[in-house]
Image: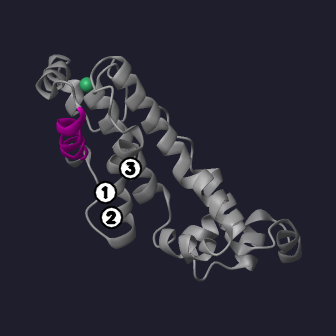
Amino acid sequence: MEALRNCGYAKFALEKVAAAAGTTKAAIRRRWPKRQRLVICALASILVAPPTPDTGCTRCDLTRTVRLLAETLHAQLPNGILAPLIADCAADPELHEHLVSVLVRPSKQAATAAIERAVERGDLRPDVDTDALVDLLAATAYQRALFGGAPIDQSSARRLVDIVLRGAAVDFERLVLISEQRGQRHDSSRLLHHD
Ligand SMILES: [Zn+2]
């Protein structure tokens, strides 16, 4: 993984991986016949599955979901890896599926669980389109990771979530009130549960 971080995707060299792993190029080729697969496996080893936020506060749970994804895309993925990796996997359905399962699905599942809990609590309307909400919450992070733009910090994540909540909440003002009643921990930039 260090080789990937240092060299970038295009220059990602088997020799360096072999040296870093204390093995030979031939051994690595046998195990990972496709470079993309090696890169995806390297990503899987650094991307920990995001915890599903469960603070009891819908505004905080969704904000944390957005921040965890943004953190993965901006801080954990080596720079310049995402677009070439997606392109390289596009023609091979199996590789594409592997990439999605490592990179996309874990954060989608965390967001889906947070939204379903919010519907159960009566915070979001029961008829909300969960898949659409999940995609809306993730879209800005992917857009910026692929095409550039400021990293998503706590306050921009909260603004994004509020835009989505205004369209999906049973009573948006009530959710704001709940989050404000819980005190300043809601303004913390740390990704910690506040209870
Ligand atoms: Zn909260």
Give the camera-side residue of 172 and 141: 172
Q: Which mark is residue 144?
A: 2
Q: Residue 119's quadrant in the figure?
A: top left
Q: Position of residue 72 (x, y in %)?
A: 45, 52
**CA neighbours of label 2 inside 10 A, class few (<14), some (14 to 19), many (20+):** some
Which residue is at the far bottom? 11
Report the amino acid beneath label 1: Thr
Q: How far apart are the two marked residues, 1 and 3, measured between alpha carbons?
A: 9 Å
Whether 123 is among the magenta residues is no
What residue does disc 1 label? 140
Q: Position of residue 63 (x, y in %)?
A: 30, 38
Report the amino acid beneath label 3: Asp
What residue does disc 3 label? 135
Q: Position of residue 191 (x, y in %)?
A: 36, 35
First along the sequence among labels 1 and 3: 3
Contact (CB < 8 A) between labels 2 and 1?
yes
- Asked whether, in this view, residue 51 is left or right of residue 28, the answer is left
Instruction: Report the magenta residues as a range.
Output: 157-168
**CA neighbours of label 3 inside 10 A, class few (<14), some (14 to 19), many (20+):** some
Q: Position of residue 141 (x, y in %)?
A: 35, 56
- The residue that appears at 46% across and 73% down in the rendered structure is 80
Q: Nearer the viewer, mark 3 or mark 2?
A: 3
Report the amino acid beneath label 2: Arg
Secondary structure under tag 1 reads helix
Q: How far apart are the two marked residues, 3 and 2, measured between alpha carbons?
A: 14 Å
- The residue that appears at 73% across and 67% down in the rendered structure is 20
- Asked whether, in this view, residue 128 is left or right of residue 47, the answer is left
Give the camera-side residue of 107 and 26: 107
Secondary structure under tag 3 reads helix
